[in-house]
Amino acid sequence: MLQRYRFEIGCVVALLACFLITQVELNRFYYFAGFAILQYVLISTAWNILGGYGGYINFGTAGFLGLGTYVAIAMIQWYGAGIIEQIIVAGALAGLLGLGIGYITLRLKGVYFAIATLAIAIVLETFVNNWDYVGGAAGVSILPPRTPELLGITIVDRKGGGIFYNNKEWLFFLMGALAIASVWIARTIEFGKLGRGLNAIKDNEEAAECMGVPTLKLKLIATVISGALMGVAGAVFPSYLTFVDPPTAFNLEFAVNSLAMPMIGGTFTWIGPVVGSILLGTVQQVAIVTISSEINLLIIGLLLVIFVTIAPHGIVGWFMKKNK
Amino acid sequence: MAEALLKVDSVTKNFGGFTALSEVTTEVKAGERFGLIGPNGSGKTTLINCISGTLTNDGGSIIFDGQDLQGMKAHVRTAAGITRTFQIPRPFHSMTIIDNLKIPLEFVSASGRAQTEIRDEAMSILETMGMAEKADEETSGLTQIELRKLELARAIAAKPKLLISDEAMAGLTGNEVDEVTQILINFNEQGMTIIMIEHIMRAVMQFSQRVICLDAGQLIAEGTPDIIQKDKGVERAYLGV
């Protein structure tokens, strides 16, 4: 019984842990860093649905993420939308972007698809640079609501009336919940018909098609889900950073990290991206404080080269082989 | 004899300026064992790519089971009852052998059924191929004949009306060729129509009830194995004399 629901129990425990951490009033930096790590759990998990299960490498993570970010900003500018509305709309629009991009590019195989996705971020960034309503190239400052409410419950109140003491804690918890939800979605896909179909596509697309797998449809579904989750990750960004400019939202670092983290963790199963992003995310946060923020890409690059040569199935694959 | 299951009518396929198939017309009857021969590069695989939907023919029409296949995607054709194997085996290498069979079962022939039923079904197909004890092994450890058998088993798992076997015997020993031929004959006896593409003449002549021969994209001979073996055009195509 307990064995069967091990994953679900794990999710609940992780969510509770996220909540308890927000209640112990740590140094504000820990929530800030924890948010970044949890955001990477969400982004890598999203990337892995198409990249890991289906074998289609998406370099456009920053595009989907930036779209989510700027949808949220536009909604705040427009009528001061609440964070949950921002997340839902940003996710939906990023999913639509995935559908559109997928329909055009998924007929391309392998490296051609990867190159096509690389262009998304650049096109969108150019667009936002010229759109003054959301700050244009100069960026925009967001003032989060002082006492946000959800369904009539005060979420954050410095006077102690809300669930969380400050906004960073609330956003940390929210990102934790979103990351856990994304892992749950990825795992459901992995053990379902969609996951098995995507695996067949990764192994041999033509054979999959000839064995009755509707390859284009499955790839589109995966791109939509993957894109929507990236958009969700982006939607929380403006509230978290309070100042956003296009180079931050469309940073190529997201694209590099979102594929390096699953690859280092192991792309074939849901836990790979989780392990990879927690490990590398933590290393990056430590490096930012102790060395410099510029060293991050170097660390990622080196680790990626090491893992691709020594442990091509990632950390999880390596341990599974050892246990056999 | 029964109705035509597959009608290929004036099918043409060009790759740039090269004509791979030129107005090929033929019929395969329901329940037939049909041989397709021809020298390398004669268009055999191109023809079955057009039939199975991995390529689109530029001209002519293909009618299967009364249905025009024009514009129909390969996976829809599989669901309609056409399944093919590949000349070079293309197993799903990250999966176990039984999981390879589960793909066509889950997506086509046993769609919507419970996983345990699908597993039982896959197991019974592996048993008919004599591969049951390998069910949970990885595909990387398979020998040539086992790969060929897996390729056939996976195709059969889609429960096709028409099975197209593309050089299922290349690289096999004499005994193994007989074994695979017997497997195909057994499935034919259960009602499956089979097109065999083969270079091993002994096998294709023994297996087929009717044979066609392609040369440079054109159909040059059609008839019973006896007639084909005596055909001057076929001899010329193969030996160049």
Image (cartoon, rainbow, N blue to C red):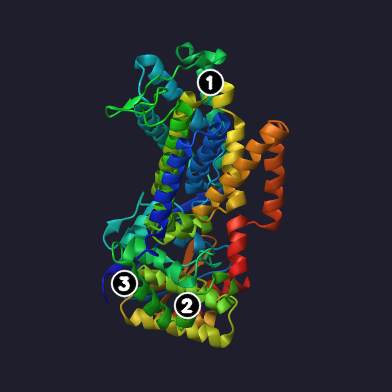
- Residue closest to the far bottom: B175
List the residue tagged with mark 3: B117
Whether label 1 touches label 3, CB < 8 Å: no
Q: Is residue B165 visible?
A: yes
Local packing at callout 2 (Cα closer than 10 Å; few below 14, some 14-19, many 20+) is many
Alpha carbons under labels 3 and 2: distance apart: 45 Å
Q: Quadrant of the C terminus of chain B?
A: bottom right
Q: Which mark is residue B228?
A: 2
Local secondary structure at mark 3: helix
Q: In the rendering, at what x and y percent does residue B167 appear? A: 52, 72
* Residue drawn 42% across the image and 56% down it: A7
| Mark 1 or mark 3, whichever is nearer to me | 1
* Residue drawn 42% across the image and 69% down it: B101
**Direction from residue B121 to residue A37 in the image, left or right:** right
Read off the chain for label 1.
Answer: A
List the residue tagged with mark 1: A244
Q: Quadrant of the N terminus of chain B?
A: bottom left
Q: In the rendering, at what x and y percent does residue B24 appear? A: 43, 60
Q: Which mark is residue B74?
A: none
Q: In the rendering, at what x and y percent does residue B90 appear? A: 53, 65
**Direction from residue A300 to residue B121 in the image, left or right:** left
Which is more toward the observer, B186 or A179? Answer: A179
Q: Image quarter for residue A290?
A: top right
Residue flagged by tag 3: what amino acid is it?
Glu
